[in-house]
Structure formats: structure tokens, C-alpha cells
Amino acid sequence: DAGVTQSPTHLIKTRGQQVTLRCSPKSGHDTVSWYQQALGQGPQFIFQYYEEEERQRGNFPDRFSGHQFPNYSSELNVNALLLGDSALYLCASSAQGHLYEQYFGPGTRLTVT
Amino acid sequence: KNEVEQSPQNLTAQEGEFITINCSYSVGISALHWLQQHPGGGIVSLFMLSSGKKKHGRLIATINIQEKHSSLHITASHPRDSAVYICAGLYGGSQGNLIFGKGTKLSVKP
């Protein structure tokens, strides 16, 4: 079992650009949550996807959007990048009804210059 | 507002020492996670607990629901335990999301 995988591991973008981050959940999991972790801070919840729909959303602007595919993998898209979007983006997967058992991926380190 | 607070923010210990990290949370959590994050970012889930106490090797986690408080203990600490330890509360029941503390940076010196 490969666990939760994320790609790419590192990414450098310029202000105003758009970025797509990808996450493959652990086998058997159908729910994907995305978190943003700024340097020195705890992760902040962005949104959660289940059955290809956004089920919950944290306090993030509409520039942050996502998608879940039929195979439960997920993408996080960020438009009009700002310097403040530089962070580690973490994906966590879980099974419906077992959201307390979230398994985390290694994260994607995004740097916006 | 749902909040999770950890203490201390930073902790330095000598190898072999007993370590305690504390976590306090506001009402409404259904479960609490303790997570470990090494430099580079990857997060590993150590414990999930909603009551009582759990033990895994040298790690022990306890939770007191009435006092809204949890602790993570490390016995016989080792330099490889050096990491950031994060507690996170699951709010919202079966469709909830995790609210994270800011983490405790632990450094264990040989």
C-alpha cells in the first residue's frame, strides 16, 4: 500500500500564476482533505472532497479550488498566486465515517516569488 | 471559535529525559490527534483518541474530556524523537475537519 502520495514535492511559481497540486489517497479511502501550513504554523483546513464534491470549506478565498476524480484522487488549484500562498500543502485521506483516521501525504512545498 | 492550543512552543531535552507536551482545546471535538512532523514536512499520525489513554512504544497519549486537555508523553527520549509534535482536534463529528495547534518543536540532545 503506497499510502497517500502527493505531487510535485516542490514547486516554484511567480505571483499571478496558477498552480495545480495533486493527491492520491490511501487505498480504500474515499475522502480527501487539503491543508495549508505556513512556515512555523500549524496546518489550516482548506477544504474536503467526498463523492467528487466539496463537502466542507475552511476560511480560504475562491482562488483556492479543487476537484475529486472518480478514482478518489484530488487536485488543489490556486489561481492568481500571492506571495502569501507560499506554504506546505498537505493532503490527507480518510474513509467516510472514519474521518478521525486521517492519513497524511508528504506535502507539496510551494514557493511563490 | 474552535481552538487548539499547545504548550510549550519549543522544548529542549537531554537524551533519556521524560517529556510532556500539553494540548488544550475548546468544546466540540469528537476526537483528538497527535501528529509528528519531521523537517521536510511529512506528517505521521501517532495517536487518535477520544477518551482515556493510549500507548505505543515509548509514546503515551492521554485525554481528559472533562478538562478538555490532552498530553503526549515520551519516555526515555532519544535524539531521533526530535521533531514538531502537533495536536489536532476533530470538530463536527462524522463530517468534521481537523483544527490544528501550532505545534511543539522538540529537540533532544545526545
Image (tube, coloured by chain):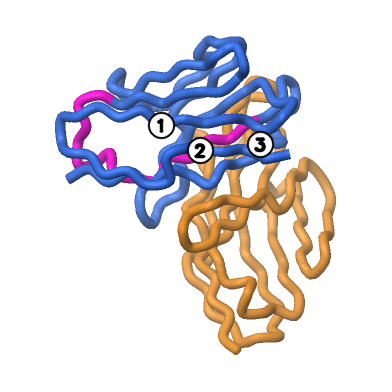
Chain colours: A blue, B orange
- The chain identifier of the residue carrying mark 3 reads A
How far is the residue under mark 2 from the one under mark 1?
Answer: 8 Å
The answer to whether marks 2 and 1 mark residues whose Cβ atoms lie closer than 8 Å is yes
Q: Mark 3 points at which residue?
A: A102
Residue at image location 67% in from the left, 21% down from the top: A30
- Tag 2: amino acid: Gln
For the magenta stretch, what is the residue range?
Answer: A79-93
Q: Is residue A16 toward the left or the right of residue B68 in the image?
A: left
Q: Which of marks 3 and 2 is nearer the N terminus?
A: 2
How far is the residue under mark 3 from the one under mark 2?
Answer: 15 Å
The numbered mark at residue A21 is: 1
Residue at image location 56% in from the left, 42% down from the top: A105
Q: Earlier in the sequence, mark 2 or mark 1?
A: 2
Residue B93 coordinates in the image, percent (x, y): 68, 24
- Tag 3: amino acid: Gln
Was residue A81 drawn as part of the magenta stretch in this picture?
yes
Q: Is residue A106 toward the left or the right of residue A60 in the image?
A: right
How far is the residue under mark 1 from the one under mark 3?
Answer: 19 Å
- Tag 1: amino acid: Leu
Q: Mark 2 points at which residue?
A: A6
Residue at image location 56% in from the left, 85% down from the top: B109
Q: Which is closer to the viewer, label 3 or label 2?
A: 2
Q: Is residue A4 above or below residue B75?
A: above
Residue at image location 54% in from the left, 14% down from the top: A69
Was residue A12 drawn as part of the magenta stretch in this picture?
no
Residue A58 coordinates in the image, percent (x, y): 44, 26
The numbered mark at residue A8 is: none
Badge count: 3
Q: Is residue B5 toward the left or the right of residue A77 in the image?
A: right
Q: Nearer the viewer, residue A6 or A42?
A: A6
